Amino acid sequence: MEDNRPSVLSVEHLSKQYKKGVYASQDVTFDVKEGEIFALIGPNGAGKTTTIRMIATLLKPTEGDALVGGCSIKTDPAGVRENLTYLPDEAGAYKNMKGRQYLRFMAEMYAKDRSQVEGFVKEAEKICSLGDRLNDKIETYSRGMTRKLLLARTIMSKPKIAILDEPTSGLDIINALEIRRMIKVLASDGMSFLLSSHNMLEIEYVSDRVGIIARGHLLEVGRPAELLEKYKADNLEDVFELVVMKKDITGW
Amino acid sequence: MKFASLLKKELREMLNTQTIFMLLLMLFMMYGMGGMLNKSAEKASEESSRITICDLDDTKFTQSVLMFLEHPTSDMQNEVKTVTLKSDDYAAELDRLDVNSFVIIPEGFTDDINNGKQAKVTYVSRMTSMSMLSNVNVGSETALQLITSAVKTAMYSDFKNRGKLTDDEAALIEAPVTVDECTIVRDKSENISQLILYSSLYSRSLFMPLVVYILILLGSQTMINAVSAEKLDKTLETLLSAPITRLHVISAKMLAAAAVALLNAVVYMIGMNNMNLSPTGDIGEEYTKMIEKLGLVFDFRTYLLIGVQMLLTMLISLSIAMILGAFAKNIKSSQTLLLPLMFVTIVPFMACMFLDISTLPGAVRYVLYAIPFTHTFMASDTVMFGKTELYTAGLIYQAVFLIICMTIAVKIFTSDYIFTAGEFIGRRKKKKHAEEDQ
Ligand SMILES: Nc1ncnc2c1ncn2[C@@H]1O[C@H](COP(=O)(O)OP(=O)(O)OP(=O)(O)O)[C@@H](O)[C@H]1O
Ligand SMILES: [Mg+2]
């Protein structure tokens, strides 16, 4: 099936070396279309966070480039930051702030004017469904509540693309489900998502396309259904195993 | 058994390589400090046995006093230099003779002794620092004692020749000499003892460096906590991926930490002022006037010059703390990272309390000068005692140091470093464990 929606993110041969000779991510190429949910899946240490941090302009790529809404992470990082929001994995928030204060503070970072700030905060309040707890200090929040607050912050400003590193890690089934549903709704409105996870089963349900990454290499990209068919597997976990095994045999 | 294991674990946590290293460093620095103190105490006592004297009376009696001054006993020797004064401008004479003090035996000294009256000498000294050792050991007490015993010896041998001692003479010989003291600050002189000046001002001289020290301590503490918390909570990643300039992120942090530190400083200043450490509290009006005339007061200019120094020092310590914070792996390590900074702060702080750094031997002096904070601890000395060149040089050095620190801080915050610095060790360990697990 040909997808001719425009690309919001296109990653081209992106590589990162922390130390000489050791690639945390190597020659990664993929793209994310408008309104698409793309997931990078791979085990711990595969290079998901490294790739994402490069796209979010936090790390400079050793080689390659990425365009976010047409802006290059190398030549126009400021432009890139206008087009995306980023939720780091295991992120916290300012513990001394109240939930609503945090939302307002972050809204001010992204908004162009006052009225937009109000709009963002309203939106976030709706998304996070924390109700009155927004008046409490963040240090009193449970892990799931913090996560929801941060997620609301990430999508309240309706960026071209929201990058979520392990969005559901540490959440119970109900909350994870809620967040996945939310992502799907927003994507249908035209917002794009780049997710990462090592929970391949959950990713199967939420993402339009997945990229399988291991030891820094993007080994396979495709729709979950396509991949299941191609590898004659029952679920993505099996696909992953097969992909990595095949590469191990043929060498990379 | 279980308790022993627990104890072992606690010790391992608390006594890691970092703390042991800091302990050794501390020991090393203490030795250095002790050496410095000994050296300058030695130097000071050497100086107090070196007496420059001007004999205006010039009689046989005073000549024998000088002789006894030089050789109090057959096996003791003081270094006595006799000079002649060219004017009454003592400040200029001290400069010309290149000494910090001299004693004047006035005309009529011998007559007074012969008439059974207490004779007077004048002790002129230059005050160059507010530090303890530079004021305690130069005291006129030493000079007075030496001269008194010389006068006594001269009188004894005089009387011995005459073969008798009247009651009056016997009374006089108990305390034959009194001293008039004159202290010079820069080019001004007042008839007040340097020791009295020091004792009425030392609380102030302690208080300034203390405020500076607290400022550095609290400022850098606040900063390193703020930076490492942002880093560890990953709120920094969020901020740096938002459409704001990173310079704003950095400068907001600097400004806030500076404000917090300043607030603290103000509170401390108010508190300490209330403790009535001001010289007017316990000494007479007359003395207060003299202190003012000598220029040893905190007027607007003094506050301004010291204030500029303080500001620079604070910004330097904040940017260093910011850099250190980037290396934090966890909250505990951020505190440990701060220790070296505290150390290079406490050394000049202590040194300034006890010593006049500008008179220390070369190598030690330059090591201290290399610590930018030293110049601020010295600021009340350099400003009030007119060591203008030293003040200016210190200021320039601090400014350069600040620019370098800020550049490094900005570099770290605008590059990968902020996310990769300090992670190496932790990561490598984690990786190794992961490999072992496989
Ligand atoms: N700051 C760093 N310095 C050195 N090596 C690093 C650094 N950060 C990551 N690495 C290495 O790069 C590789 C990829 O790490 P990355 O964090 O991108 O993995 P990940 O896919 O996000 O894993 P996880 O699922 O555990 O989050 C790992 O081998 C890791 O050890
Ligand atoms: Mg990761």
Image (cartoon, coloured by chain):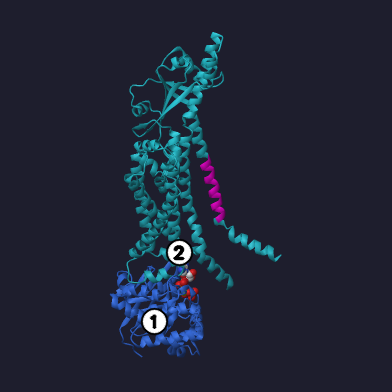
Chain colours: A blue, B cyan
Q: Quadrant of residue A33?
A: bottom left
The percent position of residue B272, horizontal first and vertical second, equals: 44, 50
The percent position of residue B405, horizontal first and vertical second, equals: 38, 55
Q: Residue sitting at 42 percent across and 84 percent down?
A: A129
* Mark 2–mark 1 CB contact (< 8 Å): no
The answer to whether any part of residue A19 appears in the image is: no
Is ligand 1 within 8 Å of the beta carbon of the residue shown at mark 2? no
Q: Is residue A209 magenta?
A: no
Decide whether the magenta segment is chiefly helix, strand or loop.
helix
Residue toward you, A99 or B420: A99
Q: CA–CA distance between discs 2 and 1? A: 29 Å
Q: Is residue B29 magenta?
A: yes
- Amino acid type for the residue under numbered disc 2: Ser
Extent of the magenta region: B19-34
Relative to B63, residue B180 above or below? below
Please tell me the numbered disc located at residue A125.
1
Residue toward you, B175 or A148: B175
Q: Residue sitting at 34 percent across and 50 percent down?
A: B399
The percent position of residue A34, horizontal first and vertical second, equals: 33, 84
For numbered disc 2, what is the local secondary structure?
A: helix
Quarter in which the N terminus of chain B is drawn: bottom right
For numbered disc 1, what is the local secondary structure?
A: helix
The residue wearing badge 2 is B228
- Amino acid type for the residue under numbered disc 1: Glu
The answer to whether any part of residue B68 appears in the image is: yes
Q: Name the subunit of mark 1.
A: A
Q: Name the subunit of mark 2.
A: B
